[in-house]
Amino acid sequence: MSAPPYQIIIGLEVHVQLATQTKLFCRCSTQFGAPPNTQTCPVCTGLPGALPVMNRHAYELALVTARALNCEIPRYTKWDRKQYYYPDLPKGYQISQYDLPMSQHGYLEISDPQDRFEPKRVRVLRAHLEEDAGKSMHDEVAGRADSRIDLNRTGTPLLEIVSEPDMRSPLEAKAYLTELKLLLTYLGVSDCNMQEGSLRVDANVNLWLDVDGERVATPIVEIKNMNSFRAVERALTYEAERQFDVWEETGQRLGDVPKQTRGWDDNACVTKAQRSKEESSDYRYFPDPDLVPVMVTDDQLAVAESQLGELPAALRSRLQREYEVSAYDADVLVNQGRAVVDYFVEAARVSRDPKKASNWIQRDVLRALNESGTNIEDFGVCARNLGELIEQINDGQIPGSRGVEVFHQMREARSTLAEAMETLGITGVDSGELIALCQELLAKNPRVVSDVLNGKEAAVGSLIGQAKKSNPNVDPALVRQTCLDLIRQQST
Amino acid sequence: MTLIQMTATELKAAIEQGQTSCVEITRAYLDEIGRVDARVNAYLWKGGQSALDAAQAVDERRTRGQDVGLLAGLPVAIKDLLCTRGLRTTCASRMLAEFVPPYDATVVQRIAQADGVLLGKTNLDEFAMGGSTENSAFGVTRNPWDLDRVAGGSSGGAAACVAASTAPLSIGTDTGGSIRQPAAFCGVSGLKPTYGRVSRYGLVAFASSLDQIGPLGWSVADLALLLEAIAGHDAADATSADVPVPAYTRTVNESLKGLKLGVPREHFDDGLDPAVAKLVQAAIDVYRQQGAEIREISLPHSRYAIAAYYIIAPSEASSNLARYDGAHYGYRTDEVKMMEEWESERKALEKAGDDAGLNALDSPLVRMYRRSRAEGFGAEVKRRIMLGTYALSAGYYDAYYLKALKVRRLIRDDYDRAFQEVDFIVGPVTPSPAFAVGAMIDDPLSLYLQDLFTVSANLAGIASLAIPCGLTEQGLPVGLQLQAPPFQEERLLRAGHMYQVETDWHRQRPQLP
């Protein structure tokens, strides 16, 4: 496939629901899934006379996130009203931040462990706080065309993170989102659940084309309605091709037509133009006179810094440096979240074999977690037990061939290593015992010895079955090696 | 002297001395309301039995020797712009004609906690927009001194009920003069406290950065009493100030020595009615005779105050009133009728093959918004929503709203400079006394100019007091305005009281046969 004759320019706007107990401007709960309109009060339903009061905790979470995104934190930030009419917006305006956002000019570094794109720094234009709107449910059951409004979500704190148009492929966009989500998860500032709307993505896309050596940009299109990272990737891929077709057909350039908003249809796999009435309007932003500006102190900034902890990028390089795992492995482990990294670190410490610990986690632990749908904190094999298992295998106390069996025994019975070995009847076979057994087998099978001496090493294979019959705990690989060693010693 | 001729301070003393009871006082006011309010129309809702029950509860507590709050069971009328739980709060608008809030405004709560008795809810210009209470959806409030004249506004009912002796104490709100102007027109005392002194929680917003709740009553001592009950920080209002509340009632009788009063030359130019000028000068002389030093000062930017005010207030109003869209509460247009019309329009367009017309046809939702707002709001409210919407629109924001904010800053600077020289600024409340009902109904601009001397205090956020200082030859009250630096209410009330010790204008009452 040849490269397309254009470059895709992508910027992303991500809305993250912050993990506060209460809403941004009142004390209603933010718990997801309550019966409609049960988590409301005069403030979030916009009753006459009600006034907003800022939730400090939401601001603190936003501050930590902004610092993790390497943003500058202005000393002074304020609230503005974004005005439009919609039934899920009971005040007729959304409290947001317009010209003085609480943070700006940061960046997030992305890379691809498979090297499908060069590592790059995606600039973050700004991250600002705002309140969420409610939910409209268009209910057409029994021929009725009712619209129902649930205001439980109204006033939930959102952090809107706006990137610069620095991404050049759907893959990079997906990498940015994955890395951002990982960062938010490490910080613990959001549960990032896309199904529950805790993380929402809009994309701005256009193309750069080379026309007679001159760069031409196509009109920017905003895409909404993408409900998974996969959908983002697919929508962007589709949209780039669509824009190229439109370009070939119309030759429209940036500025020729107003900015268009299109919605992604995940079933049809196309973006569809949204009705022009739903498009950009004059929001008549102005400072909200009900709220006071927020001044940030050195102490608050210091507290935010102290809460950052070790972030994914730093953790990846530390795993490579201190545990000598590959970049790819470090990426897999870190991407699983802090708990998996902690698990790895402990298993590596106990086993004194980080490489094997990493392999076990990636091959067996993660698969088991996936299959059972549990998380690592509740997993039947704790990091210490896995570490011991690896150590015993390395020491020959457990045959390598039976490691997986022991692992699953520990997992299912939630037992210690010793208990699992006992249940499975595994006891260590020391080297003297092994040598004696092999000598006995070789004595009984002179044909095997002569075959090996004639260059047919594979003949030893027939002894392994007999060895296991005689002692089920022997490690087949060790039997094989020991027999070969003995034959060579005899022949010299 | 009958009960309803006494000041609130006197009534409180009489209750405490066992000369009367809260029930007697409440009944006396309810009787007077029954006798005269049909002519004055100060009340939109009258307490009746619920007020008597509340008064009785206070009496019983006092009889049992239990503590009784600062307001001692006195009746208080509340402007129908403050939310009252379970009680209709209309804002004098068709839009909220049936609106029953599920919560009490902080001030309503504090009055209840101080054992004030809710006597009724008073009339106003719709959403407090106006200066004559003619913009009420429920009829004009008339001036008890001359029923052919307006009571002023927007707190017209709040001032008229005090003037008509149908309430001893009353709560108003002041966005550009809405307490002080009707107080002056009705010959009663009224205070606009410093912005942030009194919680706005539960006050239905007109212009959030200017609105402030304040007391009205006969005497300045009465204002001290009611202010002490309602003032103070409220965690539910981010703009309320965390500044301690002095015991205003304890110090209001203490006169101030070495007072320096500033008289702004801008307040005494051509626009001022000579009759008003004369009475205000005479009032200033009363202070002079008490040893006050009178200095001419200048507030050079005051000439821009009206212009700035009529950008800022409508801008905020256009946003604050967006919530009245018929979707969640309040007035909604007749949807059945609306949908019938909409369907027939759509069919006609279809039949005519008018695609452009079909495309331009508003959605039922948008039509519901338009109709509900068109039918629910009165003309003045719509005018201000349009002014504000225009001023905040893209491309106009800098030229209007932002510029008005800069003017506002300059006006505040004028005051800061003046208050380095003088303790208070003294002058008229309004350019002229109460005008006839209907006189300005077609001339909104002239009506806006009535706010000439009052809007600056709101723009600057300072405290401002209006007290009666005489009657014109036609027998119409004239008000004196005293303005103080932020959070200087304690001294401002003392200064106002000094005048009322020497004069009895505040005791003059109109005769309503």
Image: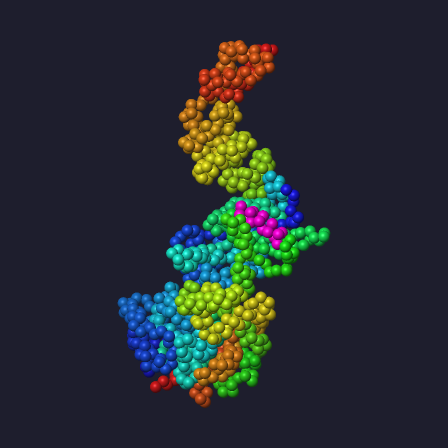
Looking at the image, which residue is at 52% across and 87% down?
A: B274
Q: Which residues are magenta?
A: A229-246
Total labels: the figure holds: 0
Q: Is residue B347 magenta?
A: no
**Residue A271 in the image: above or below residue B268:** above
**Residue A380 in the image: above or below residue B402:** above
B123 left or right of A314?
left
Residue A180 visible, this angle: no
Q: Which image quarter is the N terminus of chain B in?
A: bottom left
Q: How is the image coloured?
A: rainbow
Percent position of residue B190, x then y: 44, 76
Percent position of residue B246, x then y: 44, 68
**Residue A246 in the image: above or below residue B309:** above
Looking at the rendering, which quadrant does residue B159 occupy? bottom left
Looking at the rendering, which quadrant does residue B55 occupy? bottom left
Residue A244 visible, this angle: yes
Looking at the image, which residue is at 51% across and 51% down?
A: A265
Percent position of residue B110, x then y: 39, 67
Looking at the image, which residue is at 54% across and 78% down?
A: B262
Percent position of residue B176, x then y: 49, 74
Looking at the image, which residue is at 56% across and 70% down?
A: B391
Q: Which image quarter is the C terminus of chain B in?
A: bottom left
- For this rendering, which residue is in front, A63 or B235? A63
Q: Is residue A231 magenta?
A: yes
Please, what is the dominant secondary structure of the magenta stretch?
helix
